[in-house]
Each structure stands twice: as structure tokens, then as C-alpha cells.
Image (spheres, helix red, strand yellow):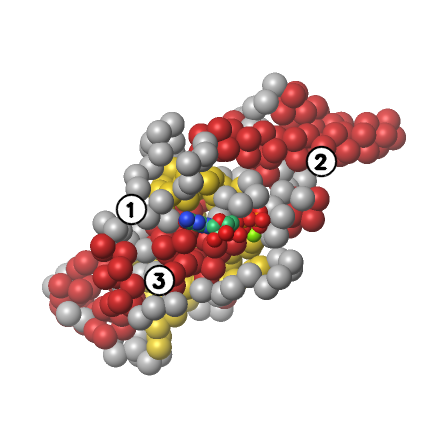
Amino acid sequence: MKSIGIVGMPYSGKSTLFQALTRSGSAGGRSNQAVVDVPDERLTVLGDIERSEKIVHAKVLFVDVPGGLTAKGIAEFRNMDALTIVVRAFGADADPAGELASVHGELLLADMANIESGLEKARKRAKQAKEAKSELEMLERAHAMLDSERALREGDFDQDALKALKGFGPLTLKPYVVVANVEEGADVPTGLEGNALALSAGLESEVAGMQEAEAAELLAEFGVKESGLSRVIAAGYRVLDLITFLTTGEDETRAWEVRRGAKAPEAAGTIHSDLERGFIRAEVVTYEDLVSAGSWDGAKAKGQLRVEGKDYIVQEGDVLHVRFAI
Ligand SMILES: Nc1nc2c(ncn2[C@@H]2O[C@H](COP(=O)(O)OP(=O)(O)OP(=O)(O)O)[C@@H](O)[C@H]2O)c(=O)[nH]1
Ligand SMILES: [Mg+2]
């Protein structure tokens, strides 16, 4: 399960967005964490086809810290996989593009403080232990980047350096999604086109408590076709480079997240480590083929079932049956 921290300037609407995404209210002053189901309409369709007893969605953890980028907030956000940056685009004095620049600036400063204290320790250690030298070099590079106001995600660190750097949890290394918190029905504000998704946290939190049909109707009045939750998660999956594959059977139909480019055994490993260790092969059918064939057996009869080995790269929407032995 991936975690997404909600960051932004005070009053940008972070807690309102958190409530809209998670349907849970902000409980005075404490940090809010909530696990939500990743919306996926394919699950109900597949579950019906295979008469599954239950449907299990993939999950995402959202975290909202009151006060935002305080020391406590920064410490929490360091553990997150990705960030959602909320900028206020409602109200007469809104300056969403300027606010986004300010947030990036704050993230750079937070990382600078962190890397500087790491550097100090690494310098001491490097005097005694040679092994500490590569970490010192990495930190010096990171420091130089931050010093010239460049986010660490822009650096081309090699794998080892990246791993060491990740240990510090730098915020500017994390992938992020920008949410412009707009007036109901408004478009992405000037200056953020192509880089942000527009939603009204106020409107979305209002509909979060409604029945699905009622909510869709109210959203449609403002030209909103897809819920904020779906859009934020889809954007999050994009920046995290994740895809979804599916499993289905009598007991359950389930969605799983895996990094794009993962081979079948790695994907199987997200289900259970035994499936990766003992991976033999996977039977694969695309969601579309399975639905049009009407059943797993039907897809097999139509020759749409593929038998794939260890090198198969799992694709978005693949339905997998993993064969394994341990
Ligand atoms: N009109 C309008 N008001 C909003 C919207 N989203 C949030 N607000 C209001 O803006 C104020 C701040 O919203 P919050 O969600 O508490 O903002 P925050 O970013 O969590 O603020 P801090 O935690 O104090 O940093 C509240 O009064 C909200 O009701 C929106 O989409 N439209
Ligand atoms: Mg708040």
C-alpha cells in the first residue's frame, strides 16, 4: 500500500481535501491518517462474472498533518511514498502558481536542513571509515543541488546513492501531484495548466457523505465527471509509476498494485512471497477479453488465455492466475 502525504500552505484546503478523499473528519489538532479503497469499477464486473464472495480493492493511505510543513509534519511526510500538494485557487486573492512555488521552496528548505545535518555526521564518520566516503559524496551532491534550488528528483543518482539518499526521506525526491483547490466547476488556473488537476475540495467533501447517485448528480451540475478521489489516485499512480493487475476466483476478486515494468514473479510476490519464490508460470487474460468472453473458462476456450513465464512484464488490467510450487 502506498502512502500519500497532503502538503500545502495554511488554509489551502488540505484538511477539506483529506475529508473529501477519505470521508473522515479532521479530529482537532492530531494528524489524520486514513486508508481508502482505490476506486476500480472493473472489480464489480469481474466479481459478478466469477461469482466471487468478496471484492477487495487496492488501498492507499492518505495523511494530513495539521499546520502542514511544521517540524512534526515534515518528519511524517518523510515516510510517505508521494505527496499531494494543495494550492488555494478559490477566493479573490488566490495566487495558486505563486503558492506552488512557495511550497516547492519550503520543501527545498526542509531537505536542506536534513541533508546538512546528515552531511555533518557523514564528514565525521568519513574521517574514520572509508565506507562512509561514498555516502559523503552523495550528500555533497545532494547539498549542491539544493543549494542551487534544484529538487533532488532531478538528480541522476546511481542506484546505490539513490538508496542511501532515500534513507534520509527527502521531500523533493518524492513524486507529487498538484491539486488546485478551485471554485466549484472552475478549470485549472492560469500558470498551472498541464501540471495540476483542478477540483473543489469544498464541493467534493460535501458530496463525500452522500449516496453515490446523489453525489454524481451534484458533481455533474458543476461539470465534474469523475470523483476527486479517482482523479487524485489516478494521478498518484501515474507519478508513482504503478499499474493495477487483477485476480479473480470464487473466494475473491481483487486489485493489486505493482510498479510498471514488474515481471510476473514480482507481481505474484505482491500477493504472497510464496508465489514469487515458487513461481512457475502465470495464466494471463486481459480484463477486456475476460469480460467479453464472459468467464475464465470461456476466455480459455476462445484461446485468449496466455501462459506466461518468469520474464513476462505484467500490464495494466491483466487478470492473473499464478501457478506455483514450494
Ligand atoms: N470556498 C471554498 N472554501 C474552501 C474550500 N476548501 C476549503 N475551504 C475553506 O478554507 C478554509 C481552510 O480549509 P482547511 O481544509 O482547513 O485548510 P488546511 O489547508 O487544512 O489549513 P491548515 O491545516 O490550517 O493549514 C476552511 O474554512 C474551509 O472551509 C473550497 O474548495 N472552497
Ligand atoms: Mg488542516
Q: CA distance from mark 3 to mark 1?
A: 14 Å
Residue 312: x and y, percent? Answer: 34, 50
Q: Specify the quadrant of the image occupied by residue 137.
A: top right
Q: Report the residue at 59% width, 38% height from top.
A: 171
Q: CA distance from mark 1 to mark 2?
A: 40 Å
In the current view of this chain or complex, which residue is farthest to the right? Answer: 128
Q: Which one is in front in this view, the residue at disc 2 or the one at disc 3?
A: 3
Q: Is residue 301 left or right of residue 263?
A: left
Q: Amino acid at mark 3?
A: Val
Say whether marks 2 and 3 touch (CB < 8 Å): no
Q: In terms of sequence position, does the residue under pointer 1 or pointer 2 come before the other?
A: 2
Q: Which one is in front in this view, the residue at disc 1 or the one at disc 2?
A: 1
- Name the foreground residue: 254 vs 26: 26
Q: Report the residue at 33% width, 37% height from top.
A: 188
Say whether marks 1 and 2 touch (CB < 8 Å): no
Density class for disc 3 (Cα within 10 Å; few <14, some 14-19, many ≥20) is: many
Residue that badge 1 annotates = 185
Q: Is residue 122 left or right of residue 313?
A: right
Residue 150: x and y, percent? Answer: 56, 24
Q: Specify the quadrant of the image occupied by residue 48.
A: bottom left
Q: Amino acid at mark 2?
A: Asn
Residue that badge 3 annotates = 207
Instruction: Check mark 3 vs ligand 1: CB closer than 8 Å? yes or no.
Output: no
